[in-house]
Image (cartoon, rainbow, N blue to C red):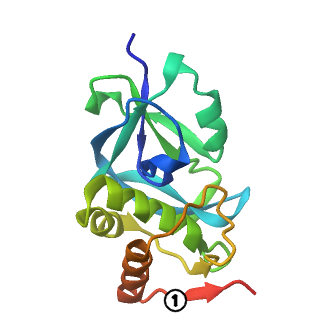
């Protein structure tokens, strides 16, 4: 039986954050990652929007087409059909454009979330993974340094290599890390 699949472009790339089977490296053309605020989150979320970019990520099976758990995890998003780019029915999650917009200083990026995403890309693609992530992600917002007490619910142990990679990239982009008050 062929199960439908999802394309992961953010935290889902970090396989420690889920147990979906049949994971494969994949690319999605015509989309880019963007940081978004939503009505029900006080922090920025990664989303995608149509663009002339190719994203690296993963696909994984959704056994028995049971989307309920993944839809709950991705509740601020709409499931978009991108099956035309894959051999199996495949979806990508995009923040609902009716209830989301570019992030602001009031909707910072959690550093623990960013660390999880970059850590996933480092494992998926080696040294080129984090570079690809930073180059193909837009609408950066201020970053809230919550490393000492992660607010991201699927935070993972952080390696020195990922810490340095994230910190160096933020510095190069001129994005300061604000400490939790």
Residue tagged 1: 176
| Image vertical order of residue 171 relative to residue 101, above or below | below
Q: Give how far across and how far down residue 175 sits, in percent.
A: 47, 86
Q: Give how far across and how far down residue 12 sits, in percent.
A: 48, 47
Q: Give how far across and how far down residue 60 sits, in percent.
A: 41, 33
Residue nearer the viewer, 145 or 27: 145
**Count of all numbered marks drawn on residues in the image:** 1
Figure quadrant of residue 75: top right
Residue 52 in sight from this viewpoint: no
Residue drawn at (69%, 74%) of the image: 149
Q: Secondary structure at mark 1?
A: loop
Side of 92 where 68 appears, left or right: right
| Image vertical order of residue 102 relative to residue 29, above or below | below
| Image vertical order of residue 133 relative to residue 70, above or below | below
Residue drawn at (66%, 69%) of the image: 150
Image quarter hosting the C terminus: bottom right
């Amino acid at each position: 039986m062929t199960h439908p699949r999802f394309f992961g472009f953010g935290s889902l790339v970090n396989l420690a954050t889920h147990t979906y089977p049949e994971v494969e490296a994949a690319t999605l053309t015509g989309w880019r990652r963007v940081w978004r605020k939503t009505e029900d989150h006080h922090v920025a979320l990664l989303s995608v929007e149509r663009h002339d970019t190719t994203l690296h990520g993963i696909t994984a099976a959704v056994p028995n087409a049971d989307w309920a758990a993944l839809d709950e995890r991705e509740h601020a998003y709409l499931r978009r059909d991108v099956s035309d780019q894959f051999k199996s029915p495949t979806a990508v999650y995009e923040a609902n454009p009716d209830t989301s917009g570019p992030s602001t200083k009031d909707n910072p990026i959690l550093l623990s979330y960013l660390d999880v995403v970059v850590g996933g890309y480092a494992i998926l693609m080696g040294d080129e993974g984090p570079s690809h992530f930073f180059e193909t992600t837009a609408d950066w917002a201020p970053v809230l340094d919550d490393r000492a007490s992660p607010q991201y619910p699927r935070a993972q142990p952080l390696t020195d290599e990922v810490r340095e990679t994230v910190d160096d990239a933020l510095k190069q982009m001129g994005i300061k890390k604000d400490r939790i008050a």
